[in-house]
Structures are given as C-alpha cells and as structure tokens.
Image (spheres, rainbow, N blue to C red):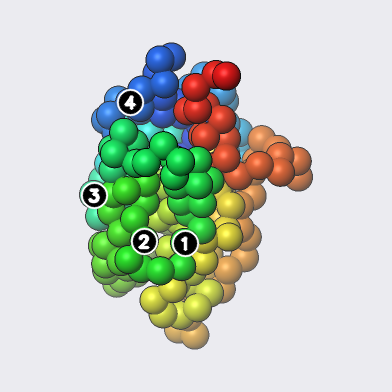
Amino acid sequence: MRRRLYLMRHAEVSYFADDGMPFRQQEVALTNRGRQQAEAARAALAGIELDRVVTSGLPRTIETARIVAPGLGAESWAELREWEGGRLADLAEDEVEQAFVGALRVRDEAARFLGGETLQELLDRVLPALERLVAEDWETALAVLHGAVNRVILSRALAGGRAYFGGFEQAPCCINVLDLGDDGWVVRTVNYVPYDPLAPARTTTMEEYWAQYRPAP
C-alpha cells in the first residue's frame, strides 16, 4: 500500500504594501480571497483522514493549514521555508523585471532568487527535509508549503534525484497528489486548483507579483 502526500502551496497573500515596499516574511498573511481559497481546498479534501500536517512555520502556511485541516496540530519545519530572496533595492533597475518573471525558472544551481539564496542552497535544505519526512511513520500527510519548495519536491518525485523543474506552476492553494511506495514516487496530480479547476489564467505567479510590485507609470 502506497502512502499519500497532499502537497499544497499556501493560499493567496499580499507581499507588498500600498507604497510598493515588500512586507517582512513574518508579516505576510492571507488575503480575504486567500482565506476563501483555503476553504475551497478544505472542501476538496473533506473526508480524507490525515495522519499529520506539515508547514514551513511561516504564517501564511500555518494560516492556510488551520483552515484546510482544522483541529489538527500543524508541525513547523523551517527547512521547508520559501526560497529566500535578497533586497530588491540591491538589484540593478534594468534587471528587476527579469529577476521577477524568471526567478523560478532557473537551471543553474548558482542562480540566486531575487539576489538572495541560491538554488543550490534551496536544494541543500529542502531535499534532506523531504528524506526525513519520508523516513517517518505516516500513511496520509498534508504539507502546506511554498511554490519553489513544491517544485523541488515534485522534481525529486519525477526525476528520482537532485533536480529542479521550474516549469511547474503552483497557483495559490493548489493541491498536488503524490504517492510513495517501495517502487518510488507516483505523481498523481499537479497544480489542481480547487476554486478554479481549469486554471484559465495564463500568467505565472511571478508575473502577477511583478504587476503588483512595479510602480504605476
């Protein structure tokens, strides 16, 4: 019997204040729409008996988990926090847009996310955490994490080794379904959006963040 991991991205948040300044990681919270998205995910997972719930410990994952799986204590695994960016003000003006829209589609492990943590550093902390989770005893788990972290986990499940496929879009509060047995991972579902199953948007998450960040003309 295979074990099952429901791998989610946290619900919608706002990363920028009205003046365009980014919030600190601990200040980022769900929007009203994000809470509605989490309620849709809760309905999608209704009736599923979960053994454990894992978050990154950042407020947006904890808040999402509390809505999606009320009554279950959510664990905080700091190694699974989002890919850490640097200071946007340190990026050259002519590089900021490409840094945003291409941030999650890199290939080189030396590439930095918005001038911050490298892809290598991300892989070096997420992959051991995934192996630790796999080694523990559970049958059905929910992990509420982040877009880049989910990409790392999905890439590991598909490639079977150290890999990063940046082309996986992860909509707010999407659900990925992965099974794990003696023969390895089986990827059942990727980026299922319970509140909008056909995902009509053709922009990526980072393109939408760029639209929020860039100053009005």
Residue 201 percent location from the top left of the image: 71, 39
The amino acid at mark 2 is: Ala
Q: Which residue is mark 2?
A: 111
The amino acid at mark 3 is: Ala
Q: Which mark is residue 23?
A: 4
Point out the tag, 1 or 4, that comes first from the N-terminus. Answer: 4
Q: Say which residue appears at 28% left-offset and 43% top-offset.
A: 86
Point out the tag, 2 or 1, that comes first from the N-terminus. Answer: 1
Q: Say which residue appears at 37% left-offset and 41% top-offset.
A: 92
Assess whether mark 3 and mark 4 are in contact (beta carbons under 8 angstroms): no
Q: Residues within 10 Å of mark 2 (few under 14, many from 20)?
A: some
- In front of the other: label 1 or label 3? 1
The amino acid at mark 1 is: Val
Say which element carries label 4: loop
- In front of the other: label 4 or label 3? 4
- In front of the other: label 2 or label 4? 2
Q: Which residue is mark 3?
A: 78
Depth check: give the residue in front, 18 or 193: 18
Depth check: give the residue in front, 121 or 111: 111
Residue 39 percent location from the top left of the image: 55, 30
- In front of the other: label 1 or label 4? 1
Q: Which residue is mark 1?
A: 106
The amino acid at mark 4 is: Phe
Q: CA distance from mark 1 to mark 4?
A: 24 Å
Residue 175 percent location from the top left of the image: 56, 49
Q: Say which residue appears at 46% left-offset and 51% top-offset.
A: 103
Assess whether mark 1 and mark 2 are in contact (beta carbons under 8 angstroms): yes
